[in-house]
Image: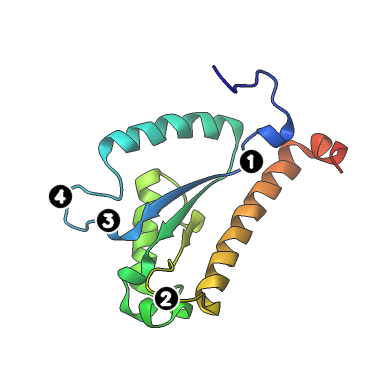
Amino acid sequence: MDGYKQQPNLEDKIHCVVYVLDAEKHSTNADIHASFITADVKKQIETIQEKIELKGIPQLILLTKVDSICESTRQSTSNVYRSSLIRQRCIAAAECLGLNPMTVLPMRNYFSEVSTTEDISILALFNVRQMLRSADSFLRVNHLKDFQTYK
């Protein structure tokens, strides 16, 4: 396989997996059975998850477009963690992928803004920081000796 490394270095390995789900794609209608992703995509993700879980690699979910499902968050990004609707959608996203709800990071996207705003950027930076913390924790637990040789 082109580009495949039999003996990958630490920097060539995965340290954290982030699934990106669209908050708008979830249906609460039980008849539709639409839960963020199609059945085919879910099967593919489950195959990937089996391998990831064997290696102990942390998994997170970035739940995008939360502002489009919640008016209070649309008005102020600071409401993202106060919204019961977003909390319910985060729980549904976690259940969809079989992960803990604490692994879901709600994200408001830049869409109609003509320039960046502090509140959206702060949420984005918080989410990136959580991803980096997960990767760092995985490295410290599983690759401390390798990690020390790269300093």
Q: Is residue 22 left or right of residue 62?
A: left
**Rendering coords of residue 80 (x, y %):** 44, 73
**Amino acid type of the residue that numbered disc 3 sits on in the rendered structure:** His
- Compared with 74, 68 (above or below) is above
**Which residue is tagged 3?**
26
Q: Secondary structure at mark 1?
A: loop
Q: Earlier in the sequence, mark 4 or mark 1?
A: 1
Task: Name the residue nearer the viewer: 112 or 137.
Answer: 112
* Gap between marks 3 and 1 measured at Cα: 28 Å
**Amino acid type of the residue that numbered disc 4 sits on in the rendered structure:** Ile
Q: Secondary structure at mark 2?
A: loop
Colouring of the image: rainbow
Q: Are marks 4 and 2 in contact (CB under 8 Å)?
A: no
Q: Are marks 4 and 3 in contact (CB under 8 Å)?
A: no
Mark closer to the observer (4, 1): 1
* Gap between marks 4 and 3 measured at Cα: 10 Å
Q: Are marks 1 and 2 in contact (CB under 8 Å)?
A: no
Mark closer to the observer (4, 2): 2
Q: Secondary structure at mark 4?
A: loop
**Which residue does the image show at 36% across and 72% down from the upper left?**
84
**Rendering coords of residue 116 (x, y %):** 51, 75
Q: Residues within 10 Å of mark 2 (few under 14, many from 20)?
A: few
Tag shown at residue 15: 1
**Rendering coords of residue 6 (x, y %):** 65, 18
Q: Residues within 10 Å of mark 4 (few under 14, many from 20)?
A: few
* Gap between marks 3 and 2 measured at Cα: 25 Å
Q: Is residue 49 left or right of residue 142?
A: left
**Which residue is tagged 2?**
113
**Amino acid type of the residue that numbered disc 2 sits on in the rendered structure:** Glu
**Which residue does the image show at 38% across and 83% down from the upper left?**
75
Tag shown at residue 32: 4
Q: Residues within 10 Å of mark 3 (few under 14, many from 20)?
A: some
